[in-house]
Amino acid sequence: MGGDELAREKMLKQKRERKIIAFTGTAALLAIVVNFAISAFNSYKEKRRKKDLPGSCVRINLSAAEIRKLADRIIAKSKEVHDTVASVSVDKVTYQDVISLAELEAKHFPLVQSCIFPRLVSTTEDVRKASAEAEQRIDIHVSMCSKREDVYRVVKAFASRGKWISAEFQCYIHCLVRDFEQNGLSLTLAKREEAQRLRAQMDEQSLQYIRNLNDDCNSLNFSEAELDGLPSEFLQSLDRAENGKFKVHLRSNHVSPLLELCKVGKTRKKVALAYGQRCKEVNMPLLENLVQLRHKYARLLGYENFADYAASSRMAKTSSKVFEFLENISTSLSDLAAKELAILKDQKKKDEGDSPFGIEDLLYYVKRIEEQKFNLDFGALKQYFPLNLVLHGIFKILQNLLGLRFDETSGAEVWHHDVCVFSVSDSSSGELLGYAYLDLYSREGKYGLTCVVPLQNGLLLSGGARQVPVVLLISNFHKEVGDHPALLRYSEVVNLFHEFGHVVHHLCNQATLGRFSGLRVDPDFVEIPSQLFENWCYESSILKLISGFHQDITRPIKDDICMSLQRWRHSFSALKLRQEILYCLFDQIIHSADNVDFLELFKYLHPKIMLGLPVLEGTNPASCFPHSAIGYEASCYSRIWSKVFAADIFVSKFSDALLNQYVGLQFRNKVLAPGGAKDPVESLSDFLGREPSIQAFVDSITLSSSL
Ligand SMILES: *[C@@H]1O[C@H](CO)[C@@H](O)[C@H](O)[C@H]1NC(C)=O
Ligand SMILES: *[C@@H]1O[C@H](CO)[C@@H](O)[C@H](O)[C@H]1NC(C)=O
Ligand SMILES: *[C@@H]1O[C@H](CO)[C@@H](O)[C@H](O)[C@H]1NC(C)=O
Ligand SMILES: [Zn+2]
C-alpha cells in the first residue's frame, strides 16, 4: 500500500483506458478490408467541413447519426472482406492477397478512430453515447474476426511458404499468425473451445474484482484530534458521521493525503490497515481462482505458466528475465534504501518516541523529511509555469533537439473551440510529418485523465507516398479566467513532457505498415520515449526555458529551486522503488507458480524486500491490487522497466547534450523511426552502441543521493 500503490491505481485507470484505445488499434488491424472503398466514405466529407488537413483521413466533429452510419459501414465492409479472404484457397493464396490486408488496414484505422475518440471529448452527450456504442460494436466485431479459423488458415498457409519481400512484411505476417494463435486458433476444436471458455471466465472475473473494489464504500470515523496535521480544507471536504466525527472513505483521494500528512500514528495505522484489507473476503478467492484460470489458459497455448505467456510478446521475453531484472535493481539499491530507512526511523523516534516504525509511517516521514530538507513550495512554484509558456518551451525543445517544427493551423475543423491543431514538419527539409490536436482544458463531459490517442498511423501507401500520422493529446488543465492565466503544477509540467514523448513517438515513426506504426510497439518499450522526456524537466537550463513568473514572464525560476527539484526527485527513491518492486515480485510470483498461498507469500516477501519492515497483519495486495487483476497481470514490472532504460538513454546520451540536435536526430532515426517491427533491444543497442543496461539508472539514484 502507500503512495506508490495509490499513484499506480490512478495510473492503472489511465492505462486501462489506453488499453481500450490501443485495443481499438488492434481492432482496426484485424478488421481487414480488401478493396476497401474509401470512396464509400466520401459522403462524410460533409459540406459544412471547414479546412481539410491535407493527408488526414480523420473525420472530425461527426454527429451521432454519422458515427452510427460510419460504424455500420466499417463493420459491413470488414465482414465482406473477411469473407473474401476466407474464400481464397490455401494453395493459391498470393502475396497480393495478404499485403492488401495491410494496405487497406491503413485506410480503416483513421475511420475507426473517428467513430471512437468522440466518446472522450465530444461536447454533446448523444455523440459520446453513439461513440461509445460504436466502439463496443466494433470491438465485438473485431473480437469475432480475430477468432475466424477460415481467415487464419489462409494467412497461415501463406506464412508457411516463407517467401518474404521484406523483414517488416515477414514480421507482419508473423504477428498476424501469432495474434490468431494467441486466440487458440492453432489448437484442436475441443481445446479451442476450452480456451474461449477460459477467456470468457477470466474477463468476467477480472471485471467482478474491479467492481467489488469500486463498490466497496467502507469508511472510518475520526475526531478532529485524531486527524491532526491535515489541512482544514481537507477536513471541511469530509462528510460528518452522526456523532460529529469525520468520515474518511477508503479511497485514494482520502487515504493518500491522510497517510502523508496525519501526525497521529494510530490513525495512520488504522487507515493503512483498513485500506489494505479492502474486499478481503470476496476478492482474495476471486484472484486465486483467476490466477489458476490464467495458468490453464497459458498452458493450453503451450506456455509453462501465465507469466511466461505474458512476457513472450514483450521486450523481457521470459519471466525469468523479469525476475533477474527486479532482483538486480533491488540488490543494487539495498544499501541506499537501508540508509534512507534509518533516517525515517530516527525522525519517528524524535517525534513519537519508541513506538516501532511500520510501513504505515513511510509516506508521512518521507514527506516530513522532504519538507525540512528541500523548502519546496509547490503552490508557489505553480506561479512560474503558465501553460502557454511551458507549451512553447516544449515546442522550442523539440525543434532544437529533434528537428521538429510545430505550427498552429488555423481554420481546421475541431470539436470544441478550445482545441488547437498543429502541423508538424521536419525543420530542415520542411517535409510535413503529421498533425497534432491538442485538447488541453477540462470541461463538462470530457474524459478526466491525460492521454494520447493516435488518430491516424504513419505508413507507406501502396503508391509509394507516405500517409502522415495524426495524434490527439487530451489533458484537463484549468483554463485562464480573466487576468488569471492557466498555471500548471510542477507535476503537471512533468506529465506534459511525458505525454509529448508519446506525441513525438507517434509522429516520428517511419514504419511501412500501420501494424507497427506509432504507438503500436512492444508494451515494454512504448513508455520508454515518454519516460525519457520527463528527464528534461529536472534540468536547470530547461526549467529556465519553460518557466516565467506569470505577472512577469521574464523572471524564470531561480537556481536554488532548480537544484532543490533535482535533489527532491531522487529523495528516498531507493526505498520507494523497493516498495514498488515488492508488488512487482508478488505479481510475478503468483503468475509463475501454482498453488501459491498469497497470504504467506506476502508475509515472507514484505520484510525481505522492505528491509525488515513486517507486513501490516491482515493486509494483502491480492484482494485490492487492481493491477494484478486487470490490465497489468504479470506485467507490473513494465513501469520500472521503461523507467530504467529511459534513464540509461538519458544519462548516456543526453545529460550533457540536452538540446544537441545531432544526438536528437540519432535518437529520432534509430529509436523512434523504426516502429514495432524492429526488436526494441536492437533499436536501443543501435543508438547506445551497446546493449541497454540498468547501471545508469542505479548510478543516477545512488550518486545523486546526498546520504
Ligand atoms: C461511524 O459512525 C456512524 C454513526 O454516524 C456509525 O453508524 C458507523 O458504524 C461508524 N463507523 C465505524 C467504522 O465506527
Ligand atoms: C543482472 O546482473 C547480472 C550480473 O551483473 C548481469 O549479468 C545481468 O545481465 C543482469 N540482468 C538484467 C536483466 O539486468
Ligand atoms: C460541430 O458540429 C455541429 C453540427 O453538427 C456544429 O453545430 C458545431 O458548431 C461544430 N463544432 C465546432 C467546434 O465546429
Ligand atoms: Zn505514458
Image: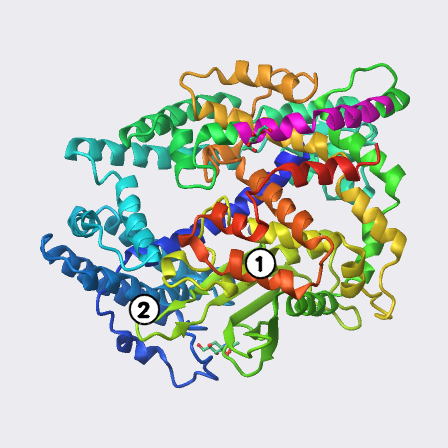
Secondary-structure class at tag 1 = helix
Q: At 51% across and 72% down in the image, what residue appears?
A: 435
Magenta span covers which residues? 324-346
C-alpha distance separating marks 1 and 2: 39 Å
Say if 356 sits above or below 141 in the image. Answer: above
Question: Which mark identifies residue 70?
Answer: 2
Percent of width and height locating residue 561? 86, 52
Q: At 32% across and 58% down in the image, what residue appears?
A: 166
Question: Which mark identifies residue 667?
Answer: 1
The N terminus - image quarter:
top right
Can residue 420 be seen in the rendering of this structure?
yes
Q: The residue under label 2 is which amino acid type?
A: Leu
Q: At 62% across and 19% down in the image, what residue appears?
A: 606
Q: Main secondary structure of the magenta part?
A: helix
From the viewer's side, name the closer residue of 513 and 241. 513
Percent of width and height locating residue 510? 45, 64
Say if 414 sits above or below 205 in the image. Answer: below
| Residue farthest along the bottom direction in this orientation | 47
Secondary-structure class at tag 2 = helix
Q: The residue under label 1 is which amino acid type?
A: Phe
- Mark 1: C-beta under 8 Å from nearest atom of ligand 4: no
Inspect the magenta stretch and tell me whether residue 63 lies in it: no
From the viewer's side, name the closer residue of 473 and 303. 303
